Amino acid sequence: MMLKTVLLKFSGPLQSWGTNSHFETRHTDDHPSKSGVIGMIAAGLGCSRDDTETLDRLDQLSGLGFAVRVDQTGQILRDYHTAKKYKPNGDLERTYVTNRYYLQDAIFLVALSSDDDELVKEVKEAVDRPYYQMFLGRRALPPTADLFQGIIDGDPITALKKYPWQAAEWYKRKPHKKIHIYADAVLLSDAPSRIRNDKAVSFSQKKGRKFDPRREAHIVIDAFSEGANAPDRREEHDAFGAIGEE
């Protein structure tokens, strides 16, 4: 069977992709996690967190080839929270100080690949008609309408090297030389890799979420020439131009 790749665009005001977070400090990595993306697809397919069939589904989805291209690097945003915990009698026990981190104005192109045509169709169906709401790492962060970019014949790395740059026009005008791609180590066997706690085993809220280590490789490619370093041709805005002169 021919290998096919589903392309997804992750774009929005905020995203968060933590693989090493605790209750009082919720970190985000600088690019999407495979476990987070697999969780999105599982939600779209209607998988419940504590359903026993979900474990088999997660194992199948985790077998998808995964790669992500950083089209627009985001900036870290820290959200400061306080939360109060009360005793059974109603007295205040303690106040928690929590910090939650997000990526703002980031854009990523995510590639999911398989030679199983039915699985590829299911991934597309999950994105087109999600059973549960999808979100970019946290429930308050929905994806944009152009999430689904299409299905391409071939492997994910080739697809990411050729697919048009998805960065915003203002970002393309900035001087860029390199674009980063992160992928399953088996897809980039000659590239340097690292261990990331990123293989989804369980999303259960009753038994606890569980993740296994996953090896992730990294390469850098030349920036796309389309729109890069172009002069700013925006005209000066005249707020009263539509009113006219008397």
Image: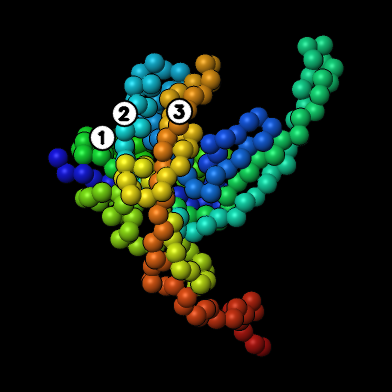
Q: Is 218 on the left-hand or right-hand side of 103?
A: left
The part of the image, by quadrant, that contains residue 123 is top left
Residue 45 location (% of width, % of height): 36, 31
Q: Quadrant of the N terminus?
A: top left
In front: 9, or 201? 201
Q: CA distance from mark 3 to mark 1?
A: 23 Å
Residue 6 location (% of width, % of height): 30, 46
Confirm or deny contact between disc 1 and disc 2 (CB under 8 A): yes
Amino acid type, callout 2: Gln
- Tell me what residue is drawn at x 80 percent, y 28 percent: 95
First reached walking from the N terminus: tag 2 or tag 3:
2
Residue position marked by numbered label 2 in the rendering: 60
Amino acid type, callout 1: Leu
Q: Compared to 90, does 18 lie above or below?
A: below
Amino acid type, callout 3: Asp
Residue position marked by numbered label 1 in the rendering: 119
- Tell me what residue is drawn at x 65 percent, y 50 percent: 77
Q: CA distance from mark 2 to mark 3?
A: 15 Å
Assign a secondary structure to mark 1: helix
Residue position marked by numbered label 3 in the rendering: 212
First reached walking from the N terminus: tag 3 or tag 1:
1
In front: 182, or 110? 182
